[in-house]
Image (tube, rainbow, N blue to C red):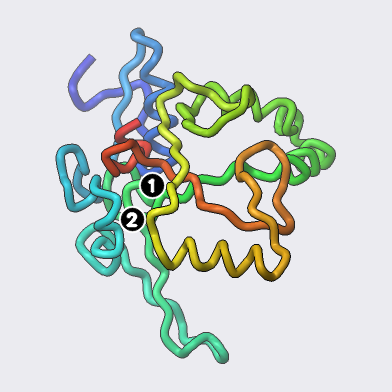
């Protein structure tokens, strides 16, 4: 096969495209090409160091789509979309939430067979390497999830204020939807604060 011929061409190496290409390439008998308009983030600390994520907005890593001014919308909005391998998972703050079980079950009830919480939660377990307690979490998957610790004084003050207002501190990503509660987020990051984007994982 020529270098310009492939069995599969994935257009866009973003969050979904990277995963699709990785899954396709698990079959050694096929060739896969990923076309991405932006640069690779491999070895690029400007992208990989999670604390630098704000610097990625309105940068060469961002399509920086303007949004038509909206009445009541502060008059000026931007729609940040990543222009880098890994897509928005290489561009955002990497906050990680499981989809609510009832939303998934509603999809299944609406005709999306295989999309119920019972179908998908085992896939979350296979995907994640999570430091949170509980047998429902995966420990060996390619995507690192870690729980933020209480090192931020603003966050600690907010949680304390929530408790004083009667809003409980509750864990996230347990398979149950939090409708009233607060806590530290889980993020897609390793212990060295390196983002776990789809291009890294």
Q: Nearer the viewer, residue 101 or 20?
A: 101
Q: Is residue 72 left or right of residue 142?
A: right
Quadrant of the rendered image containing residue 102: top right
* Viewport quadrant of the C terminus: top left
Q: Is residue 19 above or below residue 181?
A: above
Which mark is first along the chain, 1 or 2? 2
Front-lying residue, 185 or 84: 185
Q: Residues within 10 Å of mark 2 (few under 14, many from 20)?
A: many
The residue where tag 2 is placed is 82
Who's the residue at 53% across and 21% down the image? 126
Q: Residue at x 35, y 14 (%)?
A: 30
Residue situated furthest right in the rendering: 109
Give residue 89's mark. 1
Q: Secondary structure at mark 2?
A: loop
Measured from the top left, where is residue 22 in percent x and y? 38, 25
Label total for image: 2
Q: Nearer the viewer, residue 11 or 75?
A: 75
Q: State the image coordinates of residue 32 (x, y, percent, origin top left).
A: 32, 24
Are there few (<14), some (14-19), or many (20+) residues within 10 Å of tag 1? many
User: Does 99 sit left or right of 106 as displayed?
Assistant: left
Placement of 180 over or under 119, stated as above or below = below
């Amino acid at each position: 096969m020529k270098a310009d011929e492939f069995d599969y061409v994935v257009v866009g190496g973003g969050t979904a495209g990277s995963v699709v290409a990785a899954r396709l390439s698990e079959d050694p008998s096929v060739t896969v090409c990923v076309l991405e308009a932006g640069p690779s983030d491999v070895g690029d600390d400007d992208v990989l160091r999670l604390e630098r994520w704000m610097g990625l907005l309105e940068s060469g890593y961002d399509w920086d789509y303007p949004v038509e001014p909206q009445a009541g919308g502060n008059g000026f909005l931007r729609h940040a979309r990543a222009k880098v391998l890994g897509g928005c998972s290489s561009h955002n703050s990497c906050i990680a939430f499981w989809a609510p079980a009832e939303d998934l079950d509603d999809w299944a009830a609406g005709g999306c067979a295989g999309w119920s919480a019972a179908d998908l939660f085992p896939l979350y377990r296979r995907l994640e390497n999570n430091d949170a307690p509980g047998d429902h979490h995966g420990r060996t998957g390619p995507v690192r999830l870690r729980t933020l610790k209480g090192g931020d004084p603003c966050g600690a003050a907010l949680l304390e204020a929530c408790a004083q207002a009667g809003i409980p501190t509750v864990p996230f990503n347990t398979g149950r939807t939090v409708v009233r509660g607060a806590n530290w987020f889980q993020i897609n990051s390793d212990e060295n604060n390196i983002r776990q984007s789809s291009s890294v994982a």
